[in-house]
């Protein structure tokens, strides 16, 4: 079975619109979370939007006009990844696209609703339909690069990008493609510091949003006093290839996608099994898929949303699979906010840097680690970790459990 490798990566994130800026943010403890006021509706709250993004830096004005932010970010992150991979062109029938997003064109739908309320049906832009569809990011990638290979859009909530990467690797292993563009994107910002109010207030009413008033301690992964999430958005995308294809063109290989698994958790639409039973199982299955034993894992990027129930379940799952040893664990959402469908892919960008330089980011904002954690959560500042194997967890509403295993390439 062909080995599948990563040769390029790109990112648009709340703490940086390039791989360099994003990694500098992680390295220097720069968080993309900031304060936003929404007059008349709620007190000041926290949000982690993409900032200073200019679509026409990455695409022509016509494409920008016909796309929502989520597709624009995916196009930009993928172009970064293509350049990073050193790919000047693609074999159109042997290149696939597998993209993950949970909501699609949030800005365009919100703008259309406001236009309708203000001006009636005539006020709704005719391009709204093609902007809002979740598959349009992947479709735009195929249009941009002239691709006619497999095209899939996965919507598995916050597990979407892990599932996208894992399924893209399966396409290559099965022989259906030699190359794939894959990752995930989420957009809840409307631009100019605004956001999609229905999405925010739905989560607030559900009791998920942090009530922290401390700017340094908003979303605190695995902290004993964690209070909830901060919504974020962005995109992280990769070029992945069969090892044979990458070597034949002299590509620089960043890591191998060694294993992947996905399964249903199931007990509740928004809460995992409290003992982490099924999260532990998906981690074990991903390791088995990679033919790797738990003790071979050197570092773990946890889902770690900073919620009471979610973190408790994941702590128990990690304890089950990896507990009782000095495993380095982190969660990046204190830096980025919870970027939904993009979150697993953003962790993967960071994991590639861990392989390259040893930089392993700390869980920003976390001070006192939950005493139930039987592993080492990195806090306060990044650690140096010499890693050969890294596991990445993503867990989503609806019982969407996905885990990736990356291996240093040799």
Image: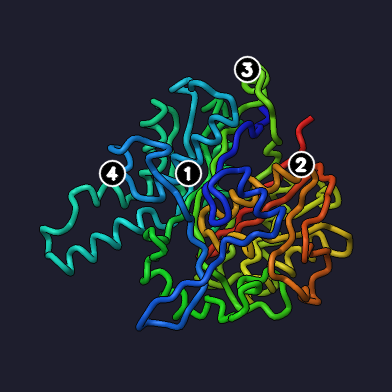
CA distance separating discs 4 and 1: 21 Å
Numbered disc in front, either 1 or 2: 2
The residue under label 2 is: 355
Instruction: Answer whether residue 1 is visible to the viewer in this image.
Output: no
CA distance separating discs 1 and 2: 24 Å
> Could you say which is closer to the camera, residue 5 or residue 223?
223
Res 240 label:
none
In primary-sequence order, the first of circles 1 and 3 is 1
**Relative to 128, is 399 on the left or the right?**
right
Instruction: Answer whether residue 179 is visible to the viewer in this image.
Output: yes
Label 3 sits on a secondary structure element that is loop
Numbered disc in front, either 1 or 3: 3
Label 4 sits on a secondary structure element that is helix
Label 1 sits on a secondary structure element that is strand
CA distance separating discs 1 and 3: 25 Å
Numbered disc in front, either 4 or 2: 4
The residue under label 1 is: 99
> Could you say which is closer to the camera, residue 376 or residue 159?
376
In x, y percent, where is residue 67? 32, 45
Query: In the orientation shown, which residue stands out farthest toward the right?
Result: 325
In primary-sequence order, the first of circles 1 and 2 is 1
In primary-sequence order, the first of circles 3 and 4 is 4
The residue under label 4 is: 65
CA distance separating discs 4 and 2: 39 Å
| Residue drawn at (39%, 60%) of the image | 192
Residue 296 higher or lower than 222, as above or below: above
Numbered disc in front, either 4 or 1: 4
- State which quarter of the image contains the N terminus: top right
Q: Residues within 10 Å of mark 3 (few under 14, many from 20)?
A: few
The residue under label 3 is: 249
């Amino acid at each position: 079975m062909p080995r599948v490798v990563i040769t390029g990566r790109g990112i648009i994130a709340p703490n940086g619109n390039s791989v360099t800026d994003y990694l500098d943010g992680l390295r220097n403890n720069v968080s993309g979370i900031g304060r936003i006021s929404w007059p008349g509706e709620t007190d000041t709250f926290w949000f982690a939007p993409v900032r200073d993004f200019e679509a026409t830096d990455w695409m022509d004005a016509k494409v920008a006009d016909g796309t929502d932010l989520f597709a624009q970010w995916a196009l930009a992150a993928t172009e970064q990844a293509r350049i990073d991979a050193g790919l000047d062109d693609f074999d159109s029938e042997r290149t696939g696209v597998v993209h993950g997003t949970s909501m699609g064109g949030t800005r365009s739908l919100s703008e259309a609703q406001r236009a309708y309320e203000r001006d009636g049906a005539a006020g709704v832009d005719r391009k709204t339909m093609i902007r809002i569809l979740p598959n349009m990011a992947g479709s735009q990638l195929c249009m941009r690069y002239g691709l006619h290979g497999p095209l899939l859009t996965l919507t598995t909530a916050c597990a979407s990008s892990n599932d996208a990467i894992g399924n893209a690797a399966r396409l290559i292993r099965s022989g259906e493609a030699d190359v794939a563009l894959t990752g995930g994107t989420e957009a809840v910002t409307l631009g100019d510091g605004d956001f999609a109010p229905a999405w925010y207030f739905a989560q607030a009413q559900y009791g998920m949003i942090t009530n922290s008033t401390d700017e340094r301690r908003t979303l605190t992964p695995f902290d004993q006093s964690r209070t909830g999430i901060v919504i974020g958005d962005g995109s992280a995308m990769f070029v992945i290839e069969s090892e044979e294809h990458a070597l034949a063109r002299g590509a620089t290989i960043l890591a191998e996608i060694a294993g992947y698994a996905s399964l249903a958790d199931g007990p509740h639409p928004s809460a995992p099994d409290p003992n982490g039973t099924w999260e532990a199982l998906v981690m074990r299955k991903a390791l088995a898929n990679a033919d790797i034993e738990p003790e071979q894992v050197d570092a773990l990027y946890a889902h770690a949303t900073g919620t009471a129930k979610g973190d408790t379940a994941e702590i128990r799952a990690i304890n089950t699979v990896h507990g009782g040893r000095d495993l380095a664990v982190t969660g990046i959402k204190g830096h980025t906010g919870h970027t939904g469908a993009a979150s697993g892919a953003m962790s993967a960008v960071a994991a590639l840097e861990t392989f390259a330089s040893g930089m392993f980011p700390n869980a920003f904002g976390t001070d006192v680690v939950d005493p139930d954690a039987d592993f080492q959560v990195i806090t306060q500042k990044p650690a140096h970790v010499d890693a050969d194997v890294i596991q990445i967890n993503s867990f989503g509403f609806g019982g969407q459990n996905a885990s990736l295993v990356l291996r240093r390439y040799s």
